[in-house]
Image: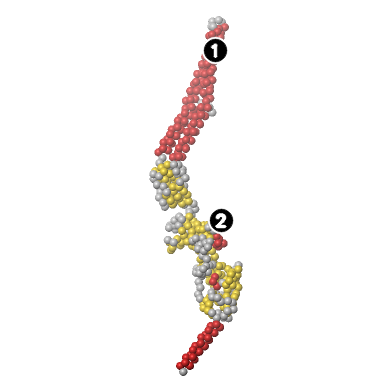
Amino acid sequence: MNKRWLALALGATVLVVAAAVGVMALRGPQVDALVVQSAPLVRTLQFSARVATLSRVDVGSTITGRVAQVRVREGAQVRQGDVLVQLESEELRATLAQAVASERQAQARLTGLRSSGRTAAQAARAQADATLQAASASLTRVQQLVAEGFYSPAQLDEARRVVDVARAQQLSAQAQMQANADAGTDVVQAQAQLALSQAATVAAQARLAQTDLLAPADARVLVRAVEPGQIVQPGKALLSLALAGPTQLVAQVDERFLDQLQPGQMASVVADAFAGQRFAARVLSIAPSVDAQRGAIEVKFALEQQAPAYLREDMTLSVEVETARRERALVLPQAALRGTVVGDTGTVLVLQDGRAQARSVRLGLRTLDAVEVLDGLKEGDTVLRGGVVQAGDRVRTRTVAWTAGAVAPGAATPGKGPGGDAGSALTNAMGR
């Protein structure tokens, strides 16, 4: 009896299990499903950027010398014309004093030629004229006396010689007057000497001025690479300055996302050290060329308000740019798409009469984990996600909640996948 009852019980169990398996087979496998709903969809692009001013300049010496004093420290704000570094200048000051003395000497000589020199030349000319006149009169008398036989011919020769000497003195006095005139050779030579002395003075002043290294514009000192007593030479940067001006952010963005960026797009910026202090920026410009080595393109951002006080030159920031937005759209996860998307057309499996049915859909805005459905579905449709279900299979569904923003396992992350730009990441959000 016990064996009979045991056999009956075992047979009943087998029948129950077989019936359960049959029912499960008729109902199909259980798969995840979600109900299509409308929601806002935002696509954002995240990457790293650095702080940069409009321009940065290196300040160095144009002469070789010893540093006497450094008047600024790193981080200091300076005004245009402020003395940043002073070099020893005693030798150059002596050279300038010598040039000034030579200039004064040349000026005095020119002034003398134009005043006392001209007076002396005029007096010499008058004296020469008088001497020639007297010699000429004496020659006339001698000639008469020789003709009358009172003087000998030798005395006539002497009178003629005196006249020749007086005439030569007159020509010399006339030449001296011409040399002292405004266009005369002596005056021209003195003017040239004065100009040469003045040029030497200007050169000495310029070299002396080079001992003071001045701020070229309002700026902030970024790097100080000089100390008192140091010997400096031309071509070596002693200070690095960030010129005052609008603060910009510069980022290197993977060229794959170039089609998503446009000037004027708004961005949210945050520094890791000040995570609670976000500020706004906008895309200012996109470089016309791509860095071939990194496969990245330079994007510049302008701040929408005054730069936060904590920003520092070359500080690394996280930038999130909103590249597209749909205030209301039918949204599906990328994982719900079946097969390969061709252009803007994809395929999904929907639940219809307890079975999986393939349906073609037209897609719009796409993010890493979400996609906008423009045509092929309506709000309230049930879409199957995951599993190995094929079109026509009977299925059992388990409705799951889904929120965009979490990248599916295995999805490529810009900046971390092959060919990505370090520090970049594309994120997406629905309802943000």
Which mark is on residue 160? 1
Q: Residues within 10 Å of mark 1 (few under 14, many from 20)?
A: some
Q: Residues within 10 Å of mark 2 (few under 14, many from 20)?
A: few
Q: Amino acid at mark 2?
A: Ser
> Which of the two residues, 243 or 127, is positioned nearer the viewer here?
243
Residue that appears at 59% across and 69% down: 341
Q: Position of residue 103 (x, y in %)?
A: 46, 33
Q: Position of residue 105 (x, y in %)?
A: 45, 30
Q: Position of residue 313 (x, y in %)?
A: 45, 55
> Which of the two residues, 155 or 11, is positioned nearer the viewer here?
11
> Which of the two residues, 392 or 425, is positioned nearer the viewer here?
392
> Which of the two residues, 334 or 244, is positioned nearer the viewer here?
334
Residue that appears at 49% across and 29% down: 190
Residue that appears at 53% across and 86% down: 19
Calculate the distance from the C-alpha at mark 2 to the C-alpha at mark 1: 97 Å
Which quadrant of the view contains residue 101? top left
Which mark is on residue 289? 2
Helix, strand or loop at mark 2 = strand
Is residue 264 positioned above or below 210 on the image?
A: below
Is residue 77 positioned above or below 46 on the image?
A: above
Q: Earlier in the sequence, mark 2 or mark 1?
A: 1
Is residue 314 positioned above or below 236 on the image?
A: below
